[in-house]
Image (cartoon, grey):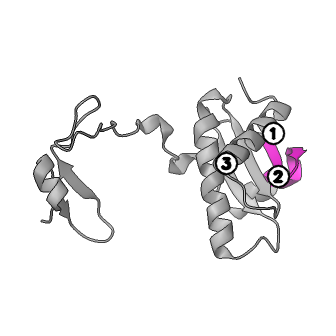
Amino acid sequence: MFSSAAGQRAGISCQYLTKKSLISCDNVPIRGENSPDGVQIDAPMSDSFRFRRKEHLKGRSEVREVFGNGRQFSCRGAKLFVLRNKLPHNRICFTFTRGYGNAVARNRARRLGREAYRLIQPRLSGGHDLILLVYPETDMALFDRTKQLKTLFTKAGLLI
């Protein structure tokens, strides 16, 4: 059991179990409640905004099928491959061309892509396998990546 000074003032206790387990917190303030320090606390995000495992396009055969049979839509810095699936939700994969920086740059671009997708996801029609191929470019901000994805999804006719 551990707690920080701020956590003790707020009456929050957390327990760290193992590296692979979750941290459990009790007495976490809900939306609208103020912490003792006078800072507004937001509620945790709803589960609908999570990037779940079932939304990942995985496996070499699935990715090859989308690359081979999917429709392509491109804009500056990215290309989107789209193929219908028989599922009620979309599955997506973020991939990069050869020579796209080092691992740090690829992981940052992947995080930005996932966050941009998460923001746009509620406005997309379901039932598609998607691959976002990102080309090397100058460092993009979240706003730019979101704008890029909106352009691609509009071209593909997926944006509702």
Relative to 111, 6 lies left or right: left
Q: Residues within 10 Å of mark 3 (few under 14, many from 20)?
A: many
| N-terminal-most mark, 2 or 1 | 2
Q: Identify whether 113 is placed above or below 103.
A: above
Badge 2: few (under 14), some or many (20 or more) residues near its Cα, within 10 Å? many
Res. 92 mark: 3
Name the mark nearer the viewer: 3 or 1: 1
Can residue 89 be seen?
no
Which residue is drawn at the image coordinates 49% and 38% (left, top)? 49
- In the picture of the structure, the residue carrying the numbered disc 2 is 78
The amino acid type found where label 2 is placed reads: Ala
Residue tagged by mark 1?
152
Q: Are marks 2 and 1 in contact (CB under 8 Å)?
A: yes
Alpha carbon separation for disc pair 3 and 1: 14 Å
Secondary structure, mark 1, is: helix
Whether residue 156 sits left or right of residue 45 in the image: it is right
The stretch in magenta equals 65-82
Residue furthest out toward the front: 38
Point 26% across, 59% down: residue:
23
Q: Position of residue 44 (x, y in %)?
A: 35, 40
